[in-house]
Image (cartoon, rainbow, N blue to C red):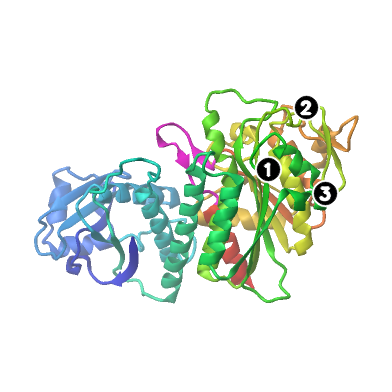
Amino acid sequence: MEFSIKQGSPEKQRSGCVLVGVFEGGKLAEAAQALDKAVQHYLSDIIAHGDMTGKAASTLLLHNVPHIQSERVLLLGLGKRDEFGARQYLDAVRAAMRALQTTGAKDAVLYLAELPVKDAKKPAQAWCITQAVLAAHEAVYRFDRLKSKTDKDKKVLKKIQFGLLTAKHDATLDAALTQALAIAQGVKLAKDLGNLPGNVCTPSYLAQQAVALAKEQKSLKVTVLEEKDMLKLGMGSLLSVTRGSDEPAKLITLEYRGGDKKQKPIVLVGKGITFDTGGISLKPGAEMDEMKYDMCGAASVLGTLQAVATMGLKLNVIGIIPTCENMPSGRAIKPGDIVTSMSGQTIEILNTDAEGRLILCDALTYAAKFEPDSVVDIATLTGACVIALGHVATGLFSNQDALAQELLSAGEQTQDRAWHMPLWEEYQPLLDSNFADMQNIGGRAGGSITAACFLARFTKEYRWAHLDIAGTAWKSGKDKGATGRPVPLLAQYLINRANSK
């Protein structure tokens, strides 16, 4: 899908469809007012007859509107004007994109950028364009590559232009569009990897995709460590998880050096359990198929690095992906086993289904070799985080409030939001073990917090944040599929860091 920005009045746009907004009560948005005047109040007459009330996220498609160049006009309901904020804008835009997909239009001009979103991040027009691009990609996304038959005749919107009535078309808007397209591609990559089944997306497959990404993006350098290399590094915790699987574990590193050589890198660490049975602490059978999504942290790192490389950010970013399967077998680790991590700390394994922290702790120790400015790990880590925050917000933990605030701010900018959770020392005793330096679970109470506390024991050398995406990385039910989160949050965080430098 092609995107561009165009200055001009809506009645003059020669396209398959022109979209304008209507607030509740039939109040026309600015572009709709201009169009209504040009068509001799044709829109006002439609509204007066009650066909469009402006109800939030409603749509009405009009054909043969007089005195205009466009084949169609799509009226988009925006809800109450004084309540029109970021959430209402996103709901409306998603509804518009769904409606456009049902038309025969191959191109459309959308007057969305100048809508008065009361809490849009500055600059407002750039924010509106960014969110519309992401919504458009979300609307057309399908994962059907493994189906024997696909709908090749389906109508597809191929070109979208963002119409500007009064705002100036400047470099800020062009930059926002370019960045949005890069983020959208990163989200798509993360979704595609997440949606692949475990018999396709193995640790070796993830490594192959990282190598392919580095070939495509010349600014990326890839390194893949094998199990023998991890053994030499002393990664006994990571290797304990993969013992029950026939698939070899991999430790993938992607380096992007877009900044000054002296600039310390930002390191992203993504959990890459390509399938999680729970190991000897076997999960229940219901919905176990969704454990293919246990590598969505790894997928988000690959998606973010792709976006960063595409944007050419003047920043140094490193992605680290520890990846393996967690399977039960005669060689698998057992509850009560004690392993030694790369840091030298020993871990008593009380539950083999708390395996994500076991691979992350060695990867976080490995991250210190890059002398990072900061480290952010991303993991579908705990069901407890889903209980705490549902499927709306990602759980955010950090050993530095300033870093947490940067990530929270990026989440608000992109509406890929996170919530700051406590990481207090009072929780640490729950991980005490009689037989090792720590145990890998802390009991039912505060499960997402004690998981973060476990990781905190391996991150004392640098600024660190942990994103628990167990509730936000995928959807269940009829809309089952990976969401691509938190690629927008991470990409915006890195954009903000690059801009600050």
* Residue 206 position within the rendered picture, expressed as x and y whole percent measured from the top left: 58, 50
Q: CA distance from mark 2 to mark 3?
A: 21 Å
Q: CA distance from mark 1 to mark 3?
A: 31 Å
The N terminus sits in image quarter: bottom left
Marks 2 and 3 in Cβ contact (< 8 Å):
no
Identify residue type, mark 3: Gly
Marks 1 and 3 in Cβ contact (< 8 Å):
no
Left or right position of 414 against 91: right
For residue 117, say whether it is visible: no
Examine the structure image and report whether residue 192 is included in the region drawn in magenta.
no
Viewer-nearest of discs 2 and 3: 3
* Residue 149 position within the rendered picture, expressed as x and y whole percent measured from the top left: 30, 41
Marks 2 and 1 in Cβ contact (< 8 Å):
no
Span colored in magenta: 472-486
Viewer-nearest of discs 1 and 3: 3
The image's mark for residue 421 is: 1
Residue at the (68%, 40%) spot, across then down: 356
Identify residue type, mark 1: Met
